[in-house]
Image (spheres, grey):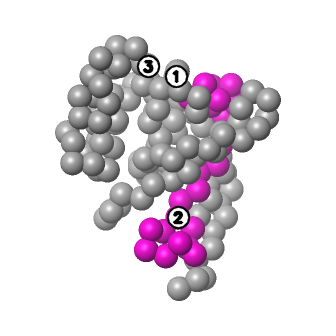
């Protein structure tokens, strides 16, 4: 990506209600990747129900957007490094912990990468 684009990740709460979060993400050539923790609400939601939606809006033209619906697979492997990659992409900081978030919190969280495998794509790219 030439510039970082934010997404809105929607997961499902245990009672079936949607829960949305503004997220950083990237693409590894196979899936969209979101980094979070097992302890945060969106992380807990995806561990229970892997169905998600990721809405991405063109920051230069809000009439252009894409919604990616899919299933999430979760891994802890490489999550710390991935988080710092996203931090460098989206901010001027080198590291998330100690740059964005208190370093003391790092030991209290289990970082995960949520791989969103696209299932259904909906887009509106006709607006100029």
**Residue identified by numbered label 3:** 110
Give me the C-alpha separation between circle 2 and circle 1: 26 Å
Q: Which residue is depicted at the point 47% across and 32% down? A: 36
Which circle's residue, 2 or 1, is located before the other in the chain?
A: 1
Give me the C-alpha separation between circle 3 and circle 2: 29 Å
102 shown above or below 123: above
Any magenta on residue 60?
Answer: yes
Using a 10 Å C-alpha cutoff, classify the residue at mark 2 as few (fewer than 14 neighbours), some (14 to 19) or many (20 or more).
Answer: some
Q: Which residue is depicted at the point 57% across and 68% down? A: 65
Estimate the x, y position of residue 11 in percent, counting from the top left: 65, 39
**Residue identified by numbered label 2:** 57
127 shown above or below 94: below
Q: Closest to the observer: 96 or 84?
A: 96
Using a 10 Å C-alpha cutoff, classify the residue at mark 1 as few (fewer than 14 neighbours), some (14 to 19) or many (20 or more).
Answer: some
15 shown above or below 70: above
Residue at the extreme front of the image, as rendered:
102
Quadrant of the frame with the N terminus: bottom left
Query: The residue tagged with tag 2: helix, strand or loop?
Result: strand
Dots 3, 2 in contact, CB < 8 A = no
Q: Which residue is depicted at the point 47% across and 41% down? A: 34
The answer to whether residue 54 shows anywhere in this view is yes
């Amino acid at each position: 990506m030439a510039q970082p684009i934010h997404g809105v990740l929607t997961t499902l709460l245990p009672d079936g209600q949607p829960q949305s979060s503004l997220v950083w993400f990237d693409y590894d050539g196979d899936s969209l990747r979101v980094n979070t923790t097992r302890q945060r609400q969106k992380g807990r939601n995806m561990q229970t129900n892997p169905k998600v939606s990721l809405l991405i809006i063109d920051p230069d033209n809000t009439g252009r957007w894409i919604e990616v619906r899919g299933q999430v697979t979760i891994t802890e492997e490489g999550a710390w490094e991935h988080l710092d990659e996203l931090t460098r992409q989206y901010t001027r900081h080198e590291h998330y912990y100690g740059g964005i978030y208190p370093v003391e919190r790092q030991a209290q969280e289990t970082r995960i990468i949520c791989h969103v495998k696209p299932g259904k794509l909906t887009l509106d790219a006709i607006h100029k």
